Amino acid sequence: MKFASLVQNRKALIGLILFALTCLVALFPGVFTSDHTPDVIGVYAPNLTPSGAHLLGTTSYGQDIYSQLVYGTRQVLLIALAAGAFATVLSVLIGITAAYMGGIVDETLSLITNVVLILPTFPLMIILARYSGTSNWVMITVLVATGWSYGANQMRAQALSLRNRDFLEAARVRGERRAYIILCEMMPTMTSLIVANFLGSALYSVLAASGLQFIGLGNTSSDSWGTMLYWAHSQEALQAGNAMWIIAPGLAIAVLSAAFALMNYAFDEIGNPALRPVRRKDLRRAAKAARGDQNAEKGAGDVYAS
Amino acid sequence: MSTPPEPTAPAKLAAPAEPLLEVKDLRIVYDSPRGPVEACSGVNLTVRPGEFVGIVGESGCGKSTLLFGIAQLHSAPARIAGGEVLFQGRDLVTLPRKELNDLRWRELAVVMQSAMNALNPVRTIGDQFKDAILAHEKWPEERIRERSAEVLSLVAIDAVHLESYPHQLSGGMRQRAMIAMALLFTPDLIVMDEPTSALDVVAQRSLMVQIKELQQQLGFAVVFVTHDMSLVSHFSDRLLVMYAGQVVEFGPTRAVFDTPSHPYSKSLLDAFPSIRGPKVPLTGIPGDPPNLADPPAGCRFNPRCPVVKDRCRTEVPELYTVASSDAVSPVLSRCLVHHPAEPLGVPLAADVNIPIVPEVQSS
Amino acid sequence: MTPLLETKDLSRHFKVGSKLFSHRLLHAVDDVNLTINEHEIVALVGESGSGKSTMARLLAQVYKPTTGEIRFQGKDVAQLRGRKDQLKYRSDVPMVFQDPFASLNPVYKVSHGIKRGLKLHRPELDAAGRHEELLRVVTAVGLNPPEEIIERYPYELSGGQRQRIGFAQALAYRPKLILADEPVSMLDVSIRIGLLNVMAKLRDEEGVSILYITHDIASARYVSDRVMVMYGGHVVESGPTETVLADPQHPYTQLLLSAVPDPRAPLEITSEAAKAEPPAVIDPAPGCRFRARCPIAVDQCMHVTPLLQPLDPDHKAACHVTAPASAGAAAV
C-alpha cells in the first residue's frame, strides 16, 4: 500500500531513481569506469577539457575527474546513510520516551534537546572535527551529535499527539507493559514520520559532510566528493580554467541531496493525506465536465474549505 | 419559560409560495482513482420562504455532500455533474464567482457541524464577526459593534463575549455564536450541517428551540442536516430522507412520521428506543449502507429491506407521488409500492402508525 | 449476595490551573456509592462534566481514587499489588471505548487487540485454542463471517463493526464486568440498536455484567436493568430503570427526560433550566449542585448537600424537596 504511493508520486519516483542509481554506482564503481585507481597522480595530462576519453576532464594532478566522482560515491553514501540512521534512532528514542514518560523525564530530555538544537552546528562541527581527527567514523559521530535534536522535537510532538488516542489507552487498560506500548503500538503508527526523518537526516549529512571535507576537516587523502572540492579549491581550479573540477562534485552533491528531498515528499504525503495535491489535470477535467465556461473559471485553482 | 413554538402550519391551507430554493436533479460526483463515485444521484428538493426542511440519513448517504453542493462549498475531487440549484430563481451552479460571493452570507448562510473547528481559535468572537461583516459591507466600526452585539443578544449571549476567545465559551455557547454569525445579514436561507451533534441532550433541545424561535421571529428558511430523525421531528415542516445518495422520501414531517411511505423511513423510525410507552425489542436496520461506487441493482435499499420482493432487485424505482397524501403538499416516495401504474402489493409494515399521544403515558 | 462491584464514597479530584501554585481542585467525582451485581446492566447517565467518564476510568484503574474505595468481588482493589493480580483485575473488568475510529490501532489487523488480550490474559490456551476463541468472540458479537473479518484492517470496517470488535476484545478475557464508556454515542442512531442488542445478548448468554455509561437516557432505558443519574460529580438518583423513568423524583432526571427528542410525544415546555449548562465543579461549597438550575430549589438546597435517600426499597434520590432526609416524615 505504502510503496504504491511512493511509485505513484512523480517527485518521489524521480528521487527514488536517482537514489537507486547512486547506490549502484557506489556498489559497483568498477562497472562505470575503466580507471580503477582514480587517486593516482600524474596518469593523464593535467587540466584536460571534457572529451570522449575523459568525460569530465582531468584535475591539475592528472587524475580523471569522472572516475574520481564514481569512486567517491561510496564514501558519501556511506556517511549519509550511517549518519542518517544513527541520528534517526537517537531522535526517535529520545523524542518518544520524553513524550510517553512525561513529567521530570520529559522536562530533562526536552531541555537537553533544546540546548543541542540551538547550538550553532557548523562551528561546533568544526571544533569537534578539529580535535577528534579525520576518520569517517569520527565524522559520522560528529554529524549524529549535532543532527539528532531537530528530529527529536518532531518525534516528541507527534508522540504527544498520539499519547491519548484511544487505542493506546486500550493497550494500557489491557495491561500491556510500557515498553511494549511504545515499541509495538505507538512507533508503528509513526513509520512515515520516522522514514521522513531519516531522509532528512541523510540529506543534512550529505551537505554537512561535504562542507567539512571542503574546508579540509575530513580525510583529505580519501576518495569523496567533498575532498575533490577541497583539492580543486586548493589548486585554484577556477583560475586554472578547470571549472569542471568544481562543478562535477558540486553537482553530484546537489543531485544526491535532491534525491533524498524528493523521496521525502512521498513520505510526507503518505503520512499526511491532507498534503496530497489535487492534481492539475483532475481540476481541469472537473472544470471541463461541469457545465459552462463560467464553471471552468470557477473550478480550477479555487480552494474552498471542505 | 416560553411555550414551544408550533411548527409553521403546513401549506395545506394556502397555495404554496414561490420556492426560495429549488434543487433540480442535482448530481454530485467524487472523482476517485478508481473512477467517479456518485454521492448524490438526481436529488430534487424545494424549500419555501420561512420553511424548515430537515434532511435525514445515515452516515455516507450523501446528505452533507448535498448540503455543500447547495451552498457551492464543495471542492475537488467533488464536482457537480448535473442539475441546478435555483436560489431566488438564479442557478448557483453556473453563477459567476463574484455574484455568488455577493449572495453568500447576505442571502445564504452556513452553520457548520463543529463550532470548535469552524471558529478561529486565536481570534476573538468579535473579530470574527467583524471579518464576516467586512467581507461583504464596508460598515463603520460602530455599526459593526452594534450589529455584533445585536445578533449575540438574539441567541442569548451577553455582548461582553465579543471579547472572548472560542475556548472560553462552552460548547453550547459556541454553537449559538456560530448561529449568531450566520444571522449577521439576516439571510433568507440558513443551511446547517448537524449543528447539534457535539452537544448534550439538554443543550441540544435548547438550541433547537432557539433556532425555531429565531426562525419565527426573523422569517428565514432553514435546511437542517442530521442523522437523528427524532431531533427534527418537532421542528421541521417537511422532511427529506436520503439513502445511498438518493431521496427516498420527502413530505410534510407529520405525514412522514405518522405514515412513513418508504420501508427505510419506517425502519429508521423504528430504530429509536422510546422512553415512553411499553418497552419493545427493536432490530434496527441490518447490514450496512451500500458502497456508492457499486450500488445494488434495482432499488438501492433492497439488500436491507424488510419487505423486499423480487421485482425490487431489477426495477429501478423513481420518486413517485404517494396517492393517499395531501394534494397540495404531497409525500414523495421512492418505493415500488407507490408506483402509479403497477404498485407493489405489499403492506409497508405490520404495525404502521406511531400516533402522537395527547399526554405522556407511564409504563 | 455480595455485589460484583461496589464503590464506597468514591471521589476523584483534579488540580486545575498552574501546576505549581494552584490549590484549586476540580471535583470530578464526589462520594459515589455504586453497586453492580452479576448478570445485570447498570446504566450511568449524565451529561458532559457529570463525572461519568471519570467513574469509568476509576473503575478501570486508569486513575487512582482521591478518597474512597472500590471493592471487586468483596476485595479492595487498591490492595491489588503485583502484576499477576493487576492483570487478573484487568481481565475481569475490561473497558470498551467511545470512538470507533480511534480505538483500534490502524496499522494492525482488527484481530491484533483480541490476540494480544488472549495472550496476556488467557495463558491456559495454546495457539490453536486462542484462534478458536478469537473466532468465537467475533461471532458472539454478530460479525460474520469471522474468518474474513479478522483479516481486515480497521479502515475496512464501518463504525458499528469496529465497536463490535471492541466488545469482542473485552469478551475475549471472559470478563465479569465490562465497562462500556459511551460505546454507541459516535454511531448513527440506526446502528446503535444493533450494538445495544449485542450488549443485552452478552448479559443473557455470556453472563457478563455491563456498566453502560451514556448521556442518552432512551438507550439506557432500552438496555439497562438499573440506572444511576449523575450530575456535577454526584449521583442524584438511582434505582430500577422502569421505576426511575416512570416516576423520576429528582428535578434533573425530569429535565433529562423532558429533553429527550421523542417523535411520539408532544414537545414539552422548555424551562429556564434547559438554558443553563452543567457546572464545572471547582472547589464547591456545600449545597446541592443543581440548585442554580432547579425549578423547585428551597433555602436548604443552598447550604446542605442532599444525600441519597431511599424512597422505595431500591429507588433513591438526592433531593431535599422530593426525598427529604427524614424519610417517612411529612414532606418539607
Image: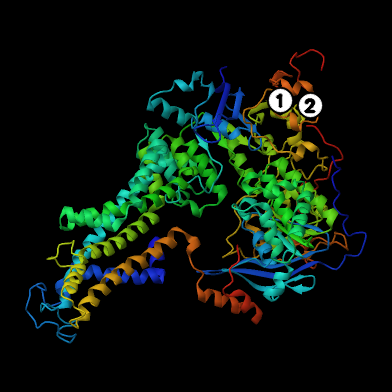
* Residue count near mark 2 (Cα–Cα under 10 Å), binned few <14, some 14–19, many ≥20: some
Q: On what subunit does the disc labeled 2 rest?
A: C
- Residue A23 visible from this viewpoint: yes
Q: What is the x, y in percent for residue A3?
A: 37, 63
Residue B61, horizontal then vertical, whole percent: 64, 59
Q: Considering only vertical position in the picture, is B302 above or below C208? A: below
**The residue positioned farthest toward the bottom in the image shown:** A52
* Residue at numbered disc 2: C297
Q: Which image quadrant: the N terminus of chain A?
A: bottom left
Tag count: 2
The C terminus of chain A, quarter of image: bottom right
Q: Which residue is mark 1?
A: C288
Residue B265 position within the rendered picture, expressed as x and y whole percent measured from the top left: 73, 53
Q: Which residue is located at x 41 percent, y 69 percent?
A: A8
Q: Residue at x 18, y 56 (%)?
A: A130
The answer to whether mark 2 and mark 1 are in CB contact below 8 A is yes
Pinpoint the chain carrying mark 1. C
* Residue A197 % position (x, y): 35, 56
Q: Residues within 10 Å of mark 1 (few under 14, many from 20)?
A: many
Q: Amino acid at mark 1?
A: Cys
Amino acid at pointer 2 = Ala
